[in-house]
Every structure is written in structure tokens, then in C-alpha cells.
Amino acid sequence: MKFSLGAIQYFWPKQVVQNFYRQAADSAVDIVYLGETVCSKRRELKYEDYMELAHMLREAGKQVCLSTMTLLEAPSELRELRRYCDNGEFLVEANDVGGISLLQENQLPFIAGPAINCYNHHSVRRLLNMGMTRWVVPVELSRDWLQDLLGQTLITDVRGCFETEVFAFGHMPLAWSGRCFTARSENRPKDQCELCCIQYPEGRTVTSQDGQQVFVLNGIQTQSGTRYNLVNQLGSMQGLVDVVRLSPQLDDTFDWLEKFRANQHGETQVPLAKLDSNGYWLNLAGLVQK
């Protein structure tokens, strides 16, 4: 079992991002994803900055993958997408079918990111035929669902041709919109947002009328209010999951990475925080912690 760091979902200052990836280079993580996947207006780091980080991480022994935008809204974003797909050095995680199309045209292998709507064995097989080498399972799906899919005849004969990756730690990305909810929460129009999301390095929480934290706003992205945490479910992933993904958090990502690595056979129960959840993996309601 390998462990990965997904692309940073939040808008962090450039120095914070660089410091984070220097820590990643010194950590025991196997795979690192780089790139802006949420909003093209977040330009603290440019393509060249990500490539510099990619080379540094590769020299540290990490497999580096470049992640593309999830929601493309302008020609400039398509041009940036092409730069990532044509980078010539690193595997690309496509978070939009437009990226898959570009990579297929150039006969390049790719990773299907969690935002790709791939929910059955026919879709998996289709993506494999297009060049997919790793599939990140949609975040809301369960172990039982994954086991059933991988056991389908259409998949069993090609199971060795791709890796399966599961989002296992962090606020789950649930939806993307043409509107920016962080800007709206500050009564700003999207085109005059003044990049206010940089003030919320862990997103902006949304609570229900009874005080329950139900969502986290992250620009145009809506995340789960609870932090998904499958540290105690790693034993049930054996034989099904090749890569376990942790989504970068501002403070304790690498502490949790070590907890995950130490518990990959599920031999001990790691205490969870009050707002941690694991329901989806267990085929329960998403907010549940069991």
C-alpha cells in the first residue's frame, strides 16, 4: 500500500506552499500531486513554480503527478490545461474529461481524478481503453461498492493494468459551481472577489440552524463539513486499494501521514476528532463516525 498527498485544495500563500512541499520531500509519502484544481484566479504559484517543486520532489524520491483544474470556464484555462498535459515529464491527474481527451489525443497515460464521474465497471473499462493507469474512486462511494466493481468480469481480467486510489483523509470535495460561495459570503461578486479565500486557509465553515457543521466553503468548491478520516479502515482496504490519499491540511498533515502508515494493517484504533467521519466507506450516512 502506498500513500499520496493530493493537490492542495485551499488558497495558501506561496511561501506556505513551498514550505509544505519541503516537508513533503522529507516525509515518507510515496506520491505527491501538484497543481491548482479549484480556481484559476489563485495565482500565488504559476506553472513554472509547480514544475520547480516537481523536480525537487522527484529528486527526493517521490512520484510526482500534476493535477488539472476541475471546472474549466475560459479559453485561458484551456490553454493552461494543455500546458499541464504537454509537460513531457510527469504523469497527469485529469479532473475534467477535457483533460482526458487531450491526453488521449497525445497517447499519454493519465490518472482519473475523484471529480471524474466514474461509477461502474463499464466506465472504468472505457477509461482504461483511453489510457488510464490509476483511478481515484469518487469520494462518496463505499468499500462494498468498490469490492463489487473490482469483482466484475469486465474488470478482473485487466485488474493488473491500473491502480486504485481512495481519498481517505481531509474535507471531501463534493461539488463545484460557476459561483464563488466564499466571495458571496463576504457580499462580493465573483469577478471582484479580491481573492478573499486566501483569508480562509482551511475553508469557511457553514453550520445549520442547530449548530451542526455541515459544509466547508472553499471558493467555488463545496466540501464536507466533517473531515473524512479512514485511518482505522486501512485493514479493510487490503487487496482492494493500492494508494491511500491524504488531502493536505494546514497544520497536521504529516503527523496524520505517520499515523496512517503505522496503522496500514488496521491493528490499532487511532482516536478520531469529534468532527471526523468515515460513514461513506462503511456504506452509511456521510456524517457518521463509527
Image (cartoon, rainbow, N blue to C red):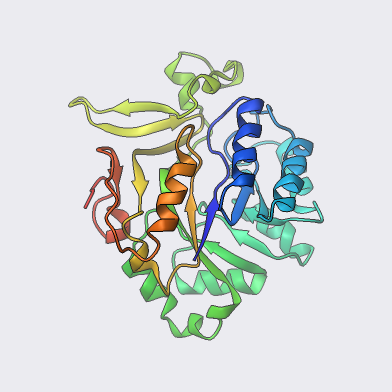
**Residue 218, image x, y percentages:** 48, 31
Question: Residue at 46% of width from left, 26% of height from top?
Answer: 181
**For the view shown, which residue lies furthest in the left direction?**
210
Residue 32 horizontal side relative to residue 246, left or right: right
Question: Residue at 64% of width from left, 28% of height from top?
Answer: 42
Residue 192, quarter of the rendered image: top right
**Residue 32, image x, y percentages:** 61, 50
Front residue of this view, candidates 131 and 192: 131
Residue 16, quarter of the rendered image: top right
**For the view shown, which residue lies furthest in the top direction?**
187
Question: Residue at 28% of width from left, 38% of height from top?
Answer: 275
Q: Taking 13 as reference, is 176 above or below it?
A: below
Residue 210 horizontal side relative to residue 251, left or right: left
Residue 254 horizontal side relative to residue 104, left or right: left
Q: Taking 145 as reference, is 113 above or below it?
A: above
**Residue 235, image x, y percentages:** 34, 66
Front residue of this view, candidates 199 and 208: 199
